Structure formats: structure tokens, C-alpha cells
Image: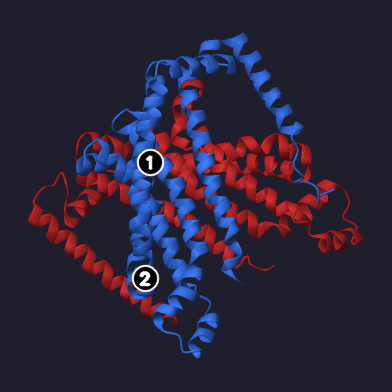
Chain colours: A red, B blue
Amino acid sequence: MKKRSKAQVRRDQIVGLVIFLSVWEIAARLLGNKLVLPSVSQILAALGDLIASGELITAMAESIWLLIVGLIVSTILGFVLGALVARSRTAYWMLNPYFSALFATPTIALVPLVLVWFGFGFPGRVIVVVLAAVVPIMFSVASGLRDDPKDLVDVARSFGVTGELQLLYRVRVRAALPVLLAGLRLAAGRGVVGMAVAETYLRLGGIGGLIKSYGSMFQTDYVFASILPLSLLGIAIVSVIGRIERRLHWT
Amino acid sequence: MLANLKKPSLYLPLLSLVIVFGGWELVGRSINPLLFSPPSVVAAEFVELYRSGVLIEAAQVTMRALFLGYAMAVIVGVPFGVVMGAFDRFGDILQPYLYAIFATPRVVLVPLIVVWFGIGFEARLFLVFFWSAIAISANTAQGVRHARPDLVEVARSFRVTRLQLARHVLIPGAIPFVLAGLRIGAERAIVGVIIGEMFLQIVGLGGVIQQGSSELVPAQMLVAVVIIASAGTLIVTALDMLERRFQNWKGA
């Protein structure tokens, strides 16, 4: 099968988008039910309204802040746990089962427990993001550090890098960077879900809260208008990390 | 030292289980056994929920929506993925939408699902089916597209028919991708059914969690969480093993 060029694909996609939006607009107008299917123009009007009132910016800022704090905590925690699990068999067999189970559990199922134990404030919300995002980071750190870059370690030793911590930072972490970024990309995707879950289930806030409150008022056009930036946020974060990953593909 | 890192050990997980459960029991009991519900309280709650029949009924409700939705996703997702892969123009145009839907957290779509499908069984079925189907068809399409050109070349040089080409080269080549799709789809399906049960109609195992939350009984929530986690791990591990078995078909 021959590959189509990038420009060709891009052109097809733009044509596809135009057709999709026109069909949506026409269908919505024919249906004439704003509750079930608002038209594209109505959604854009709602979006403009949300931007003009500053509501969207505030909500996005709040969400992004939660996401960043959550991902930073996840990264630190994931690093410590991953390094432990990678370097010690005892830690591996004592810790890994719990985190595998956590990975398989839908974050949403844990949120009520977080609510009871940690409350619905900012710490509680950060914990939800961490629960969603920490495992991929931990696993990728573990698998990245487990592949022992023997020759690199030997070279570093001969240049006078000594001590397990120095080696860890100077050689192992850097050699493992591509794997770490892949884990971070996965974690960011899951983190966005955790963020949305926290914002809709715990105290309403951020973009998730915005969507939920418009949803409970059955203002479907505003629901669409606030889902759109959230989807774009998720896609943007994942693709930025993906881009860094490709750029750093030196090994 | 690193070589035997993954050498299985039975006593280490058991030891850690004893430490974690023991610590939890001690701390939970000394602070507030109702709120922190140590393992003994959770176990008692499990027995009670099981005896009263609540648990069995909830599990049945959850499994029904999960399996029906997942089966639909497989039946629709695989052929659709083949079409997307075979007609790559169609696939290219469709992909951004599937990706956007897939990347959007489902909890925020709950208001739309209520408007379109209500809060009953159909709505839960949709939550299970749609995302699972996207995962399955996207992976299948990738598999169909990634047929190894060298094998296709060889087959062509033997003048095989299209059908033979599909049967001997394309389908075996796509199977590892399809299986990956089935695993990712199953993960998505499990999350979907729980979202539906917690945010739409309060039923099933998700409903047990939600009820425990509104009545402030962490033990009840934990019982449901443990069951969901075990069932999820079981399903995903089984599909994972299947995937590994066919991994070598992926070729270089």
C-alpha cells in the first residue's frame, strides 16, 4: 500500500472538517432542538460568550493549575517509587502489586473514598490527579532504570563519576529519558481525566465544574462550548510531550 | 543482581500484605474504625453485603452492561477498523474525531449522554460501547495499514488473489494490533460502566460505591472498589496474556 503524502492527508482532513461542520449545522437547524443538538453557530456564540465573560479563562487557569500541581507530585512520587522498584527486588515485590491494582482500577471509583478521607478541597483534588497519573510514571521510570546502560556507566566511572546517586542522576536517568517521556505522556492523558473527575465529583471548579453546572441547567450549547477547550487541552498536552519525545530521540 | 530482579517471590508480597493490612488495621482502629474502615471492618461489610444479596445483584447488573456493550464494541469495532485501514483516505479523515472523542474525559460528557440517551440501560451501554469501539477500530486500522510490505511483495510475486493476500498476510499481520485494541477497549469499557453507574442511574457496583458515599460508609465503598479492581485486573490480564501469545506475529 503506498503512503499518501502529509499535505494530501492535511487537505483531506480540512475538507472533511468543513463537510462535518456544515452537516452538523444543517442537521441542527433542521432538528431545531437546541437542547438535544445545538448548531455549530450556537456553540460558537456560547464559546464567544464564555470567553468574553472571562468565565472560561478563569476555569481553564484553575484546571491547568490543578493539572500541573498534580503532575508534578505524580512525577516526584513516580520517580521515587520507580527507582525503588527498579533497583531492589524486595521493593519490586512489595510495592508493585498495589500499583498494578491501582492502574487497573477506574479512578472514578476511588474518588468517593478520597472525598471521605481527604475532603473536597485542593489537596483532595490533587490526590485524584495523582491516583490517575502516578502509575504510568512509576512503571516507565522502573523500566527505564532497569535496562542497565552498562557501557555508559563504565564510561562515566572511568571519567570519575562515583557513587550510586551520582550515577543515577548523571547516567541512568538520562539514558532512560525516552522511556520516561513516554510514561509522562501517558500520565498526562490520564491526569486530564483525573482532573475532570475531581472537578465534577468533588467541589465544582475549573473547566469540569463549568461543564457540569451548565449541564445541570440543560444548556447544551454551553456544555459543548466548554467541552471543546477541555478536549483541546488534553490533545495539546499529549502532543507537546510527544513532540519533545521525538526531538529527544537520540539513542 | 539485576538479572533476578523479577524472579517471582511469594513471601515478599505476602509479607507486604501483612504489613499494609496490619498497619491499616492498627491505625484505623486507633483513630476511627468507621471512617478509616480497617480490613476487618471491610471484610465484615463484604459478608453482610453478600448475605443480603445486594452484592450479587449489583455485580450482575454491572456485568450485563459491561459484556453486552463490549461484545457490541468488538462486533462493530473490528470490521469498522478494517474498513478504516483498507480505505486509508476514509481513515485519515475520520481519525482526528475519534482521537478527540477518545481524549475527552467521559465524566464531562455525562450531561450530553443524559440528553441523548437518558439515564437508563441504553445510556450505560453507550458509555461502554462507544469508547471501547473506538479503541478497537483505531488499533485494527493501524494493524491493517501496517502490513509488512516485504511480505505483501512476496505474496504478490506468487500471484495470490486479494482474498488469499488478506487471509495469509494481512489478517495474521493485523492480529496483534487487534488484540491490543481489545485490551485497551476492555479497560475503557470497565471505566465506562462504572461512570454510568455512578453518574446516571445509581445501580450496579458503581451504585454501591455511590450509595456508600452518600451514607458515609467507606467500608461499603471499599468492598465495591476491591471487586471492581479484581474483576478489571482479571479481564485485562487475560487479554494481556492473549496479546503476548500473538506478539511474535507482529514481525520486525
Tag 2 secondary structure: helix
Q: Residue B162, percent across and down?
A: 40, 81
Q: Nearer the viewer, mark 1 or mark 2?
A: 1
The reply to the same-chain question for discs 1 and 2 is yes
Callout 1: helix, strand or loop?
Answer: helix
Q: Tell me the residue at 40%/30% (across/down).
A: B59
Q: Which residue is mark 1?
A: B66
**Mark 1–mark 2 distance (CA, rounded to whole Å):** 30 Å
Which mark sits nearer the N-terminus, 1 or 2?
1
Residue A126 in sight from this viewpoint: no
Is residue A46 positioned above or below B88 on the image?
A: above
Identify the residue at image location x=37%, y=21%.
Answer: B211
Compared to B173, does B97 lie above or below?
A: above
- In the foreground, B33 or B85: B85
- Quarter of the image containing the C terminus of chain B? bottom right
Q: Residues within 10 Å of mark 1 (few under 14, many from 20)?
A: many
Amino acid carrying label 2: it is Asp
Residue type for callout 1: Leu
Q: Which mark is residue B201?
A: none
Displayed quadrant of residue A56: top left
**Count of numbered tags:** 2
Considering only vertical position in the picture, is B156 above or below B228?
below
Q: Is residue A245 left or right of residue B125?
A: right
Quadrant position of residue B68: top left
Residue B159 in view here: yes
Q: Residue at (20%, 47%) from the top-left corner?
A: A221
Q: Residue at x 36, y 68 (%)?
A: B84
Label 2: which residue? B92
Chain holding disc 2: B
Q: Please, is residue B131 above or below residue A62 in the view?
A: below
Q: Position of residue A231 (x, y in %)?
A: 37, 52
